[in-house]
Image: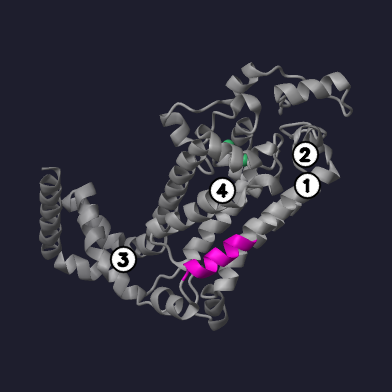
Amino acid sequence: MAIEALHKMVYSSTNLFHHQCAYNSTLLSVITPNTLHAPFYHTTKPSYIALAASKPFNLLAPILVYWAICTVFHYLDTAKYPYFENRRIHESPEMIARNKVTFNEVIKAVFLQHAIQLVLGYLWFEDSEVILRDQIYVDHLSKMANLVPWVADGTLLLLGKRAGEQVLLKHGEKLVAWIYWWGIPIAQMYFAFAVTDTWQYFMHRAMHNNRFLYRHFHSHHHRLYVPYAFGALYNHPVEGFFLDSLGSAVAEKAAFMTLRQATLLFVISSIKTADDHCGYKLWWDPCQLLFANNADYHDIHHQAYGIKSNFSQPYFTNWDRILGTQMSRTEADGKTRWKKLGHEYSEHDKHNVISEGHAKKVN
Ligand SMILES: [Zn+2]
Ligand SMILES: [Zn+2]
C-alpha cells in the first residue's frame, strides 16, 4: 500500500512538472543559461585540471592538512602563550598526568592510520582518466539545461504563477546557474555531513555498549583523557577503518560526490576532528563558532563522567539530542568540582585531577 501511494505521489508530481514545463516553454528557453556563469573554483587551466584529477594529490590533501593543523596546535601546546593558556579546557600538566599514552605512540598510530587511508583511498577512487572523462570534461551547459524545468516548477510552486514568472524572467538564468554551481554542491556537502554523523554516532555508541568492541578497539582512543589535536586519530586501526575511512566513503558515495568534492569533505573532516580534540576553547575558531559539536562538547566525552554521553561526532549534536545522550558543560560542571590550578600540581591536586576528570573553567 505504501509503495502504491508513493508511486501515485511520484506520478502526480511528474505530471505536474510536465504540465508546468509545457505551459512555460518560452519562459524555460529564456532562463536556460547559454554562458557558464562559472564560479572561481571552475577552471580550464590544464595544470589545475591535472591536479584536480590526480588521485595522489586528492588523497594526500586531507592528510597534509591534518598534520599542518595538528602541528600548529602542538606548537601552541609547547609555546604556552598566555592567551592560549587561558583558553585551555584542561590545565597543561594534566596532559601528562592523566593521559595513558605517550605523544610518540600517538604519532605512530596517526601515521599508521594515514598509511591505511592512503591505500584504501587509492583502491576506492577511479583512475584519473575516468575522473577526467566523467567529472571534469563534462557539458555543464547541458547539465544546467536539465535543471531548468525543476527550477521553473519549484519557483512557480513556491511563489505562485504571477510572482514566480516575474522572478524567473528577471533572475531565472542566474538562479539556475547558482543552484548548479553552489546550491546543489552545498546540499551534497550538508547531506554528507549528516551521513557521516549518523554513521559515526551509531558505530561509536556500539563501541561503548559492547564490552568486546570497547576493550579491544575503542578504549585505545579513550586513553586520552586530556585530548590534544594529534590524538584525534589515535585509534585502533580497526576502529580507524570502520568509523573514519568507511564512514567517509559511505558519505561521499551517498552524496554522489566527485573526487574534488570528496577531497573537500575529507579536508573539512580532518580539520574538524583535529579541532574537536585541540584542547582549547576559542570563540573565533570557525569549527567552534559554527558547530555546537566542538572541542568543549567532545572533551566531555573524553572524561570519566561523560564517557556515556556526547557520542555524536564530528559535526552536529542531533543524534545525542534525539536519543537523550547529550551532556552540556553546565551538567558536566555539576558532576565534578571546579578548581583553578596553579602552575604546579601538589600531590593532592594531581590525585583529584586523575580521579575526578577535572576540567578548568574557561572564560
Ligand atoms: Zn568514545
Ligand atoms: Zn575523541
Closer to the eye: label 2 or 3: 2
Q: Which mark is residue 103?
A: 1
**Residue at the image point whose x is 47% and y is 58% from the top:** 249
Q: Label 3's element?
A: helix
Q: Label 1's element?
A: helix
Q: Which residue is mark 3?
A: 173
Which is more toward the observer, 158 or 58? 58
**Residue at the image point whose x is 17% and y is 52% from the top:** 162
Q: Which residue is mark 4?
A: 239
The answer to whether residue 121 is magenta is: yes
- The x and y percentages for residue 288 are 60, 40
Considering only vertical position in the picture, is 282 above or below 140? above
Considering only vertical position in the picture, is 253 above or below 126? above
Mark 1 or 4 closer to N-term? 1
Mark 4 or 3 closer to N-term? 3
- The x and y percentages for residue 358 are 72, 24
Q: Label 2's element?
A: helix
Closer to the eye: label 4 or 3: 4
Measure how far apart labels 3 and 1 are at the Cα level: 55 Å
Mark 2 or 3 closer to N-term? 2
Q: Quadrant of the C terminus?
A: top right
Closer to the eye: label 1 or 4: 4
Q: Quadrant of the N terminus?
A: top left
The answer to whether residue 53 is magenta is: no
Measure how far apart labels 1 and 4 are at the Cα level: 20 Å
Q: Amino acid at mark 2?
A: Phe
**Residue at the image point whose x is 21% and y is 63% from the top:** 149
